[in-house]
Image (tube, coloured by chain):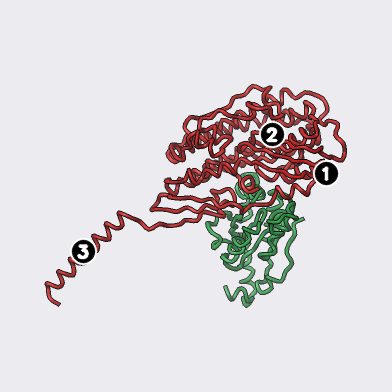
Amino acid sequence: MGLVENGKLPKPLTALLNVSRKYSLWVYQWGLACCAIEMGAAFGSPRYDVMRLGVIPFPASPRQADLVVVSGTVTDKMAPAVKRLYEQMPDPKYVISMGSCANCGGPYWDSYSVTKGVDQIIPVDVYVPGCPPRPEALLEGIVLLQERIRSEDMGERRNGDPIVVS
Amino acid sequence: MTATTDARKLAYIAGQAADARVNVELETEGMTLNIGPQHPATHGTLRIIVRLDGERVIAAEPVMGYMHRGYEKLTEVRTYPQITTLVNRIDWLGSFANEVPFILAAERLMEVEAPPRAQWIRTALFELSRIANVVLFLGDMGVQLGAITPVFFAFRDREFVLNQIEAVTGGRFHPNFDRIGGLKDDLPKGWIDETRGVLDRIRTFCDEMEDLVAGNEIFQARTRGIGVIPADVGLSYGLSGANIRASGVDWDLRRDSEMGLVHRELDWKVWTHPDGDSFARYWVRLQEVREACTIVGQCLDGIPSGPVMAKVPRIIKVPAGEAYVETENPLGIMGYYIVSKGELVPYRVKIRSASFNNVSITPWLLKGVYVPDVISILASLYFILGDIDR
């Protein structure tokens, strides 16, 4: 994917690639704590049904995933595993930080064993606030990320500000 | 090269091969398999290091602490009303049930008692959170064994229970509704009738699960006789809840002790199963959801009128002393030991959570089982990582 990352492709081809990427996001569910259940509800329950958005939540390993949802408290003991997971994913890759714990530490802001925000370890594209966020909030985050992917220039991908769902 | 040397070489090779075959049969090279820290079967981040001989587990060691968030230390710098916000998140599937023993312990120290209406509503919400918790287990156990459909059913029907909890408390997941001396609010209008409809739905769900999962031949083959816990071993490891009742121990704190809720005034039954295997644990939980529906139904019929909040000072200072209260939570016995020095914050809170003890049996239980059975045993033990590591 060197060509795509360097932004050397002609525009129509980039647009085509972006639309295809937008509607075939493979999500790896990195469920850690309470938010994992709400993520499960968003991805696995008939009421929210994420697949209608073109998101496939069943990759068997991070090596097949485009997007990872870090949902829940990242502890200092877990942090190396999160980092390793991110490094195993192929480019282009996206990260959604779900819930207050993954955003900034949340209710455990003064705990001795909690990493205050997963963005200390890996770059985050979308922050979904809430404790835990409702499944709708996660879906909103995914939709906003898809919007960004659609109009994305791969060369400038890493310079944009993260999305904050509000 | 002559024919004789050729023959001799072949004989030599054949001899070596025969030796090798004998060696393979006699001993296999051990292998260490690392399950987790992120694995669907572990409901989060439990890591289990299993030492394998062929396909048989010879040693299993659970590695905990991936979800350790330091609750017991954090409670020392939070006021009592703030602590309910924290302890909600211990067992995140049945959040309301986590608050209850803490509040009861604080109430015992302050010598206040919640009004009867608050106690009845507490009991109803306590059992609703049990339903919300165990319903997901009933579906999830199918997923662990390769049946995806049950979990969709579980999520579908769990949403209705969460709706009812949200209608009362305002929180889908973490209600933070229990107060020292009562409840934050009264029930909303029309809630009781709606909840009756939801209970019918859950009963139908239980029937579905009994046919679809528990009655399934493959499911039974994978769970019957697998992971048998004898009653005395289970008790010596401190198992509680449905895990020990599935081993035939008739022990339920809701019936056997004065918890502070109104369970003893209601008519319900404690289910046990003599087998102690994975299937028994599934079956007992299935019956417990049905019993919980019965309990909630009776609560709805019997809620007395009156206030929901006792007279409690605005700024809560708990008098010096210590109290220990344990209740029968969805996962087992959960207890809080509070030591107070008469200040705004507790001096020390020790949390006894069910899953920690339930998981402590895994090294004993997993010894000698096959690798696929590790998953089904872990799923049937039913632990929640926040409840283990706290």
Report in which chain the residue with disc 3 lies. B
Q: Residue at x 65, y 44 (%)?
A: A47
Element under label 3? helix
From what the image shows, is residue A25 above or below residue B193? below
What secondary structure is marked by label 2? helix
Q: Earlier in the sequence, mark 2 or mark 3?
A: 3
Q: Is residue B314 left or right of residue B263?
A: right
Q: Pointer 3: what residue?
A: B14
Amino acid carrying mark 1 in the image: Leu
Q: Which mark is residue B126?
A: 2
Residue sitting at x 73%, y 62%: A163
Find residue B381 and report its image quarter.
top right
* Chain drawn in red: B
> In front here: A45 or B279?
B279
- Disc 3, disc 1: CB below 8 Å? no
The image quadrant where one finds the N terminus of chain B is: bottom left
| Whole-number angstrom distance, CA of label 2 to CA of label 1 | 27 Å
Q: Chain of mark 1?
A: B
The residue closer to the viewer here, A47 or B257, is B257
Task: Read off the chain for label 2.
Answer: B
**Alpha carbon separation for disc pair 2 and 3:** 71 Å
**Dots 2 and 3 on the same chain:** yes
Report the residue marked by disc 1. Answer: B344
